[in-house]
Image: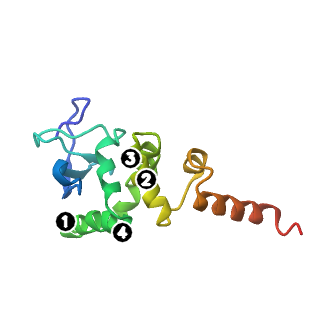
Amino acid sequence: MVDASGEQHAYVRVAEYVSPGGAQAQRHTVGLLDSGRWVWEYADGHRVSDPNNLCSFLPLLEFERPAAVAILKVGLARLSVAVSALRAFPFDGVVVLALTGSPHWQAAAEMWLDAGYPPNDRIAELRPRHPMIRRWLEQRMDAIVGDTQ
């Protein structure tokens, strides 16, 4: 398979899914390069994205997080690839990209946050007033300074 830079890579297709976008639903295909990096496959079936291009992973946010993770887990299991490969999926990068994107993607990412997606520093920076982020920051400070009362 050829990546966006024109380099040849060994590639395995992990999962195909249709985004739940109603009339504008599209088929998406994601997979793994021989480097262990996750990529998405172009519609022509002959090229894959640059691993740093997370845009086509955004439709996974339209699913509830457990369903999105299950799509990837089922694909890995079908291929007899260790489920630990899922740890390399750029979940945080996709959530951050969505939070800095259009209102549609921001809402999708916030749905994941509302459902308990664990934040990181960048996510907290982008949504400091989100109730889950506020709790996370408070718990973090409690762990740092202890009981101050």
At x 29% / y 51%, what residue is drawn?
59
Decide which of 35, 123 is in the foreground and name it.
123
- Amino acid carrying label 4: it is Pro
- Amino acid carrying label 1: it is Leu
Foreground mark, 2 or 4, reads: 2
Q: CA distance from mark 2 to mark 3?
A: 6 Å
Badge 3 element: helix
Label 2 close to label 3 by CB (< 8 Å): yes
User: Which residue does the numbered mark 2 point to in the structure image?
Assistant: 109
Mark 3: few, some, or many residues within 10 Å (few <14, many ≥20)? many
Label 2 close to label 4 by CB (< 8 Å): no
Q: CA distance from mark 1 to mark 2?
A: 29 Å
User: Which residue does the numbered mark 1 point to in the structure image?
Assistant: 79
N-term mark: 4 or 1: 4
Decide which of 61, 9 is in the foreground and name it.
61
Decide which of 102, 75 is in the foreground and name it.
102
Mark 2: few, some, or many residues within 10 Å (few <14, many ≥20)? many
Measured as percent of width and height from the top left, residue 7 is found at 23, 32
User: Which residue does the numbered mark 4 point to in the structure image?
Assistant: 66
Mark 4: few, some, or many residues within 10 Å (few <14, many ≥20)? few
Position of 4 compared to 125: left or right?
Answer: left
Badge 4 element: helix
At x 19% / y 44%, what residue is drawn?
41
Q: CA distance from mark 3 to mark 1?
A: 30 Å
Badge 2 element: helix
Badge 1 element: loop
- Amino acid carrying label 3: it is Trp
Position of 37 compared to 109: left or right?
Answer: left
Decide which of 35, 120 is in the foreground and name it.
120
Q: CA distance from mark 2 to mark 4?
A: 14 Å
